[in-house]
Amino acid sequence: MASIGIIGAGAWGTALAAHAARNDHDVTLWSREQSVVEDVVRSRENVKYLPGVRLPKLHASTDLAAVVPGAELLIFATPAQYLREVAAQVLPHLQAQTTIAIASKGMEERSLRLMTEVLSEVWPNVAKERIAMVSGPSFAREVGRGLPTDVVAASIGKHAAHTVQRLLHAPLFRIYASEDVIGVQVAGATKNVIAIAAGASDGLRFGHNALAALITRGLAEITRLGVALGARPLTFLGLAGAGDLFLTCSGDLSRNRTLGKKLAEGLDASTYLATQTSVAEGYYTARATHALARKLDVSMPISDQVYAVLHEGRPLLDAIRLLLTREIKDDE
């Protein structure tokens, strides 16, 4: 049995905490919100973020000093835009023997940084080899219920990834190790942008052909961006790439796909998101992806149109028309 700390008690952090507890570890879940802590401890349910999922016995606290010290594995599951702030608060409590895993998917909007890059900037004296990235097709509700799930843990040299495997791998939660930290992160972040487009397509009842095209061409532009950043092309054909993209574009539990469907209904994105308790990361990642693609001169037409609809006020039907009337292209 190991001591495992989970930083962030949203749906994903709660689901990971439940899985780790089912693996017979001593798990403590950190939340900013006292009401969430009380629900987890007293009723064994995160009523706000993961309602209806019965949790195994685990600890919860609003005090980082009760979560971080002594943890063999510390997992960050905060929204991507809050990772920098929370990591700075964690640092004074972090111990040298702790392995760190990041389960947050996204890019930091203002800096265009990947999550491991954010952590390295906040923790300049912590070896990058101690940090793993966990990603893959994994809806929180299904992980929380103990349904079969496969994910990837990626780290430099695989040592941290193997620690994550040793502690969290189980028959119903299989973990594959990778060294492609960049590819796993780019795939996990940008698939949310394509999922918004997929949701809009389904909301407009464009059919299965259109959805298949969006997923396929979306994967092509995600791969181009990843390779430009130094990722391995084959990573995008695996769980972190094609697997997670397919799930997020087609599954009804996808918050980003749901955002796209709301756009198709004529709702304003920021107005809709203000009513939600959970974050649709693609809203923020769309801006970062657009800026990064321009910086690296990478063609990402679907992502560009998602960005324009979300952040420049472009009407959805105009964005679709611009995509459908692009010049003739080779399949590459």
Image (cartoon, rainbow, N blue to C red):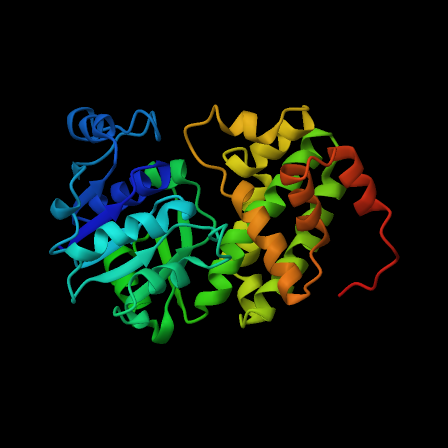
Task: Give the left or right position of residue 331, taking residue 270 as reference.
Answer: right
Residue 11: percent from the left, percent from the top? 36, 36
The answer to which image quadrant residue 117 occupies is bottom left
Viewer-side residue, 80 vs 256 = 80
Is 298 rendered above or below residue 49?
below
Q: Position of residue 230 (x, y in %)?
A: 54, 72
Location of residue 260 (image quadrant): top right
Q: Viewed as shown, does residue 30 lie left or right of 142?
A: left
Quarter the N terminus occupies: bottom left
Q: Which residue is found at the position 37% from the left and 68% from the top?
A: 155
Quarter holding the C terminus?
bottom right
Q: Would residue 60 be seen by someone viewing this image from the given angle?
A: yes
Q: How many marks?
A: 0
Q: Residue at x 71, y 60 (%)?
A: 299
Query: In this rendering, would 249 be left or right of 80?
Result: right
Instruction: Residue 66: give x, y in percent of width and height.
Output: 12, 45
**Residue 221 picture location, percent across and down:** 66, 59
Tell me if residue 19 comes above or below residue 46 in the rendering: below
Say which residue appears at 37% left-offset and 52% top-offset.
Answer: 103
